[in-house]
Amino acid sequence: MYSYSDFDESFVRARVAQFTDQVERRLDGSLTEEEFRPLRLMNGLYLQLHAYMLRVAIPYGTISPHQMRQLAMIADTYDKGYGHFTTRQNIQFNWPKLPDVPAILSALADVEMHAIQTSGNCVRNVTADHFAGAAADEIEDPRPYAELLRQWSTDHPEFQFLPRKFKIAITGAPNDRAVTRAHDIGLRMVKNAVGDSGFEVMVGGGLGRTPMIAHTVRDFLPAADLLPYVEAVLSVYNTLGRRDNKYKARIKITVHETGKEEISRMIEDRFAELRPLFGGADQALLDDIRAAFAPPAFRNASVEAYDAFYKADPVFRAWADTNLAAHRNDQYAIVTISVKAHGQTPGDASSDQMRVMADLAERYGHNDLRISHEQNVILPHVHKSDLPAIHATLAQVGLATANVGLISDIIACPGMDYCALATARSIPIATQIADRFKALDLEHEIGPLKIKISGCINACGHHHVGHIGILGLDRAGVENYQITLGGDGSETAAIGDKTGPGFAYDEIVPAVERIVRAYLSVRDTQEETFLQTFRRLGMDPFKAALYETEGAQDAA
Amino acid sequence: MSRRFTAKVVTANRLREGDVVYLTADDQWTQHHHEAELIEDEAHAQMRLLHASAQKLLIVGAYLADAKAGPNGPEPVHFREAFRTRGPSNYDHGKQADLRA
């Protein structure tokens, strides 16, 4: 993986020193909260409901065992022994004390990590396919481009005060695992007719208050044009984006109000101006970066032990069936470690679990770990013969849940258990749904089904692109949950449709169960997924299941 | 016609720890909601909020939260404020654990 250059190292250290001084001045009263707030946000430090929260960047979700162990150390020393992996491939610590934050940032810098640009109206952590560099369906590893974008956007003087935050996602595969169409800029690697690599560039996607699927502004952008083109998009947005209204400030609104044709033209015009200014230094840098993402030295060994174990052990087989994905080397597999044990908080890993995952990556996984936007941890390169040992180790620390892609593999934002912006809780809804379907023993029967829960309209829990989306709201001082169906975060991206009136806190789990039972009764075959059934039949059978009982009561 | 004033407490987070605190009638900051001063007059509420907001070395983000009288002192009205008296519901962390210890 990429290692810091001297420049990166001194930049991050200088920022730690600067923020250390700012914290001291806040604590001695030299800085007011009004002065300090933007400074702490630039360094990822929020004040939440019960405590401060520090959001640490995990660039494109790639993290080394050494870094993971340092996160565990920070969790033990300065927090409550755990961390929360987020839908933007970051990690959040929920309980840091302000005077300790400089020491935390210093400990992060020791392992080439930081919290810079994890907040504020700047280019945030660039997210990527969590299977990057490993997936069988991949055209090219997108992470060198993500790293190039990271370096270019970090402290970029023109883009530190954008109209609003800006999120870029990139994938190297046709199967979109990075939700690229719901980002300010989505980049999807494609090949042109002569076999050159490039990007489909999508602009103006986003969730939140006004969910939008991104428009494609370029079908094929040569890979060498990436930086000037992205800079052109940012530049047009920086000029046109609305600073008068926070709720209309994201680029999705700019695209919507300007129109796809006109904004594409403006981007192309700006690109024509910028392209000649890029003299090739970016490409030289990209070549250096590429070397850091060279594939590991794959082992050539028999996979017979795996095959035998798979046949013999039903628990292992269930886990292998759900938690493994196809690797480009057929002796290898991609392991998704479920951080979604039934009844546990989605995305929370204890320091012990972090250390076990770090050990496994070191021993069996070519020193590579990934964080997925679905709040799981990935071992991207595992020789199949090592899978039984990995599964056995994971089982000892509660990380062997065989539920990836199933109903209990739920995305949930922190919600009103932590977040100052939340309007309702999301975590307990997620844990109750997972527990309920475990008790029913239905989850494997149901098959692929993504539930995504947000505790407010900002949609950190991606509810709009959940097959079943749940949005927690405050309705007249009571928690109320709105359901959307048919959302999709993949290459066939779609925003879910609202079912109708929301449900109270104690009604939402039974409501989800009614939806799922309706699906089971109307699906064509066992192979027809929830999303396929919804697309075939529309809302009606689900609406009937959700509201018919109530209607009958009203009529009585 | 002005609407009837809903009783308030002054609440904030401690600057250093981030803990949720409430202003008492004798100008202390307490972690216990029921020890807060229940303010039933709008003008007095604004005065107390100003007093609180000036304590920049102790607290952050002071505001007035709706409250009501209860048998042991003021109680929160809104569920958000009820959560702030305790901590998160997924772990025994925050005040629900700290205050018991």
Image: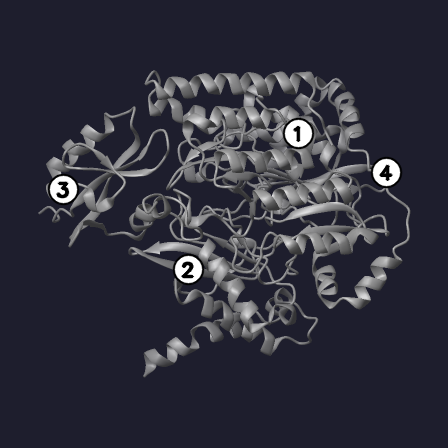
Which quadrant of the figure has residue B12? top left
Protein chain holding label 3: B
Q: Which mark is residue A481?
A: 2
Q: Secondary structure at mark 4?
A: loop
Single out the mark in the foreground, 4 or 2.
4
Separation (CA) of disc 2 from disc 3? 33 Å
Q: Is residue A419 left or right of residue A107?
A: left
Q: Are marks 4 and 2 in contact (CB under 8 Å)?
A: no
Front residue of A427/B72: it is: B72
Q: Is residue A492 visible?
A: no
Which quadrant of the figure has residue A262? top right
Front residue of B27/A541: it is: B27
Of labels 4 and 1, earlier in sequence is 1
Protein chain holding label 1: A
| Residue matched to label 3 | B39
Q: Which mark is residue A149?
A: 1
Separation (CA) of disc 4 from disc 1? 27 Å
